[in-house]
Amino acid sequence: MHPCPGPDEALTSWLERVARLHGLPARDLLRYNLGPASALLDDPAAADLDWDPPAAVLAALDERTGAGLGELRRMTIAGWVPWLLDTLEDGGQEAFDTYVRQHSVLLAPGEAGSSAVLQWRPWLPERQAHPARRVCPVCAADPDCGMPLTARLPIMTSCAGHGCRLKPGPDVAFTVPAGQVPPEPAAAHAAAMDRRTYQGLTTGQVTLPRRVVHAGVWFRLLRTLLDELTASRSRLSQASIATLERIWSATGHPWRAGLSTWRPYEQLDPRRQQQLLEAAATAMQLAETGAITARGTLGPLLTRESHGPVYEGDQSSQRDRDLLRARQELDAAIDAARTDPAAARQILTQFTAGVSLPLFERQRQFLINIGIPARFLPDARELGRIDLVDNGTE
């Protein structure tokens, strides 16, 4: 027996709910009921199931629940590479510059300058840090509501479903008695920003004033904006200083959230992170209403495009329709492949036409990760790709 996973639920939260149905602690459910894979959970490196659990553990859970490898992996941080993070490994200066400083939002391109960064990963300070959970009081009082994967990530200020401000929650059990942590409504502009983040986490895309963007664009836009809000006055033009002063004045928080020496957002204390997220929501609201001008490369996404004449038969519109139709056809083919072995074989053939053996294996694994059962996807020999088998060392 197992409940359906929530749209943004963490793997450990879902396992706690599964164990509850069987009258077991989650630790016992994992330690004695996953066959040979249970032994892997004695390894400290494999203990954080919300991070990157061993493939054998996910396979055992899939075999016993039928939840699907793609669905199980989506409940882990590893399942969000490369959308939320470029890689699970600690990066350095290049990783920071690519993720945070490659584009700009409020500031002119290049105005943020450079900052020295050693080890760094977006949104997560360090793998073993296990920052405290921040939970929605309404969700936490519901035993059938799972803990979101983002509860340990400083990426939202409110619950997208209930509009409540997130508050420090329990580190062991997610559920707390109703009323123990009273709900507090979030500001409208903060709730609007968090709904976009939730949309990105659950659908893979985000609706912005200008257009719909991929979730990966949204997470990088938000992280860049948070970085710009901590910029030093000495680096900024008078126009940018005026913009940031307008934002911080509207929040009621001190400039740069009171930060005296610049540090990456991930290394700040929860109070400053909360203030920066509120400032980011304020900046988006002001940019959308035209109260400030977002001069960065990604800035126009936060403003509505002015209406202009469009003649019938515009080529770009037809191109957009063609792209939308192609995407819908691909989504339909993937959905069919999740339940139809013939459809899965056909899409594997299309994805691996003319590729080398290593790329064939990567493409096959990609299809498994998005929810197509491995048993529906033959290997190169079973598919009749003798050319790959004979030249597998290419």
Image: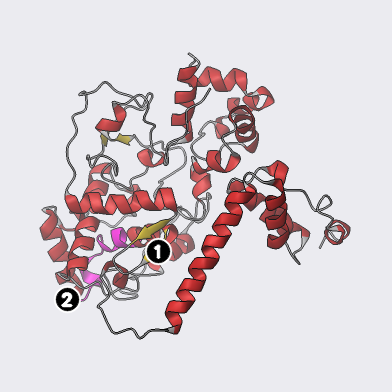
Q: Amino acid at mark 1?
A: Val
User: Which residue is depicted at the point 61% across and 32% down?
Assistant: 57
Could you say which quadrant of the image residue 144 lies in? top left
Residue 210 point in image, percent of width and height: 31, 69
Q: Is residue 348 above or below residue 71?
A: below
In what quadrant of the picture does the C terminus appear?
bottom right
Q: Is residue 372 left or right of residue 275?
A: right
Position of residue 218 measured from the top left corner of the image (x, y, whole percent): 38, 60
Image-quadrant location for residue 254: bottom left
Dot 1, how many residues are within 10 Å of its Cα: few (below 14), some (14-19), or many (20+)? Answer: some
Residue named by callout 1: 213
> What percent of the width, then of the height, locates residue 267?
34, 48
In front of the other: 208 or 254 = 208
Left or right, 324 with respect to 228, comes to right
Q: Is residue 151 above or below residue 307?
A: above
Q: Nearer the viewer, residue 388 or 116?
A: 388
| Residue under the image location 60 percent in, 56 percent down | 333
Say whether residue 67 is left or right of residue 112. Answer: right
Q: Are marks 1 and 2 in contact (CB under 8 Å)?
A: no
The disc at residue 334 is: none
Looking at the rendering, the stretch of residues picked out in magenta corresponds to 224-237
Tally the marks: 2
The amino acid marked with disc number 2 is: Gln
Viewer-side label of 1, 2: 1
